[in-house]
Image (spheres, rainbow, N blue to C red):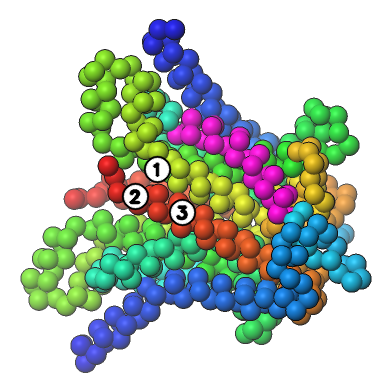
Amino acid sequence: MQKFKEFIIEKLILISGLASIFFVILIFLFLLKEGLALLEFITPGQFLFGKNWYPISEPAQLEILPLILGSLLVTFGAAVISIPIGVGCAIFIAEVSPPSIKEILKAGIELLAAIPSVVLGFIGMVTLVPWVKNIFHIPTGLTALSGSIMLAFMAMPTIVSIAEDALYSVPKSYKEGALALGATKWQAIYRVLLPAASSGIFAAVMLGLGRVIGETMAVMMITGNAAVIPTSILQPVRTLTATIAAEMGEAVVGSEHYFALFAIGIVLFVVSFMINVTADLFLHRKKI
Amino acid sequence: MDSKKTEKIAFFILFLATLLIILPVGLIVCIIIQKGFPAMTWQFLTDIPRQGMRAGGIFPAIIGTIYIVFGAILFALPIGLGAAIYLSEYTKEHFLNRLIKLSIVNLAGVPSVVYGLFGLAFFVIFFKFGASILSGSLTLGIMILPIIITASREALESVPTSFREVSYSLGASKWQTIRHIVLGNAIPGILTGTILGVGRAAGETAPILFTVAAFYLPQFPKSIFDQAMALPYHLYVISTQVPNVDEKIRYGTALVLLILVFFMNLVAIVIRYQFRKKKKW
């Protein structure tokens, strides 16, 4: 009886272990099931590279190039802001700051990571958006730039904590060797630590940007949601994620529009899958 | 330039980068507390929204969020714990182990709105649960699975091998050892992961948009097949969809959500801290 009970429990544990694989496949299958139905109406090339997103016109035009460019522009802006600041902060926390401040700084970063994106979106709406509007004298502050700044903040906790881990896991002897040869602390960081931790830092940046591309609520609240091809960072844009979140409520189940939103979901899933697999490869790369 | 001077400048720039992150965080928290605090009345916390959400309270949204998050944990904790036990105690095959870990990484990276789509297609439509607490909880449950698995696995793996060996040598079976020796010593870590999962689930909006969240529903859900209001979605609605909502109500809602999420994180941090202090090995 005892043996039998253990047998059952071990099988249950095995099933739980396999559940993650099952869920990933299930998510992908159901996105495919709903998204691929769009192929009856439009070719993949036209869907990805056509310039018109007019889902409720008659006939509906469901081409997502403006949305892809919107996502790319906002992500690019966020990357430019968050990578230098995030990596800089990681170096400061890992190598420069005195131990007493270190814990406080880390707690601050964890605090930022814990703030729900809808709260950050709200704060962005009431503070950042008016600032952007006034500083650049533009008719609306709901722009790609506002989105980039807000998203940069959401990427930073990921970048800082993973990059800091990468710096921390470089063997102490590397740095001590450099210092013993007469290098200053900064030279040791710049010439020895950073190159040694580079694959981990790269993974940190990838995961941070993965978070940016997938972010939905804050982006929807502050980028203005205009589905046109952006020509400037001071223009309203609409991202892939925001399109799904904003329009799924109105799309009729089983309509072209509904299928198109799932097809966007496939694009997002594939992109995030590639980012995560790449980042994982870099994180587990054999240490030299 | 001499290298000492370069070092000073470099460290100063690094310090500035750190300030650029920490200061806005402090500012955001201060603004929300300062402007949201006047709204914190007993009535705000316990009344239903009135006058098209321009007055009254947010009680149904608080209750809805509690129901949804509780359901998510009920679903995710057993599976997550099982997966963690499997990864730390049972796997021998390197390939399968790697595949599971890769799936967990990917689950953690799937955009939250894609979880919403999946929940809609799978739970709401395919299983015909409709937009309901059940659909929302299951969707959020899958989303927080990686958090629970990762934290629990770390906790299980930090229990020294010698504990297990002693248990085996006394004649205990593998499961008895896990149940009485390993789990007992890993509970604080598992608890920490679970609470962080709760915090995350409470703040997410995109996954519940199409699976459970009701725009305006001034009553309490009666069963798991009912729709419910939820705090994060309510904040989104009153700050973008409803015009002329009093600023106080918006900040007040943001503050309640922030307090809920921070409280969860604080509890997790305290448990972790206590555990580290008490750890005997």
Judged from the image, the secondary structure of the residue bearing numbered disc 1 is helix
**Residue type for callout 1:** Ser
| Magenta-drawn segment | A67-90
Asked if residue B259 is positioned above or below residue B133 in the image, the reply reads above
One can see residue B235 in this view:
no
Tell me which corner region of the image, top left, top right, bottom left or bottom right, holds residue A56. bottom right
Label 3 lies in what chain?
A
Q: Tell me whether circle 3 and circle 2 mark residues in contact (CB < 8 Å).
A: no
| Total labels drawn | 3
Task: Determine which of the numbered discs, if any, sits on residue A53 in the image.
Answer: none
Q: Look at mark 3 in the image and give the residue it sits on.
A: A278
Whole-percent x, y for residue B167 in the image: 13, 69
Judged from the image, the secondary structure of the residue bearing numbered disc 3 is helix
Q: Which image quadrant: the C terminus of chain A?
A: top left
Q: Look at mark 1 in the image and give the residue it sits on.
A: A199
Residue B73 relative to residue B246: left or right:
left
One can see residue A136 in this view:
yes
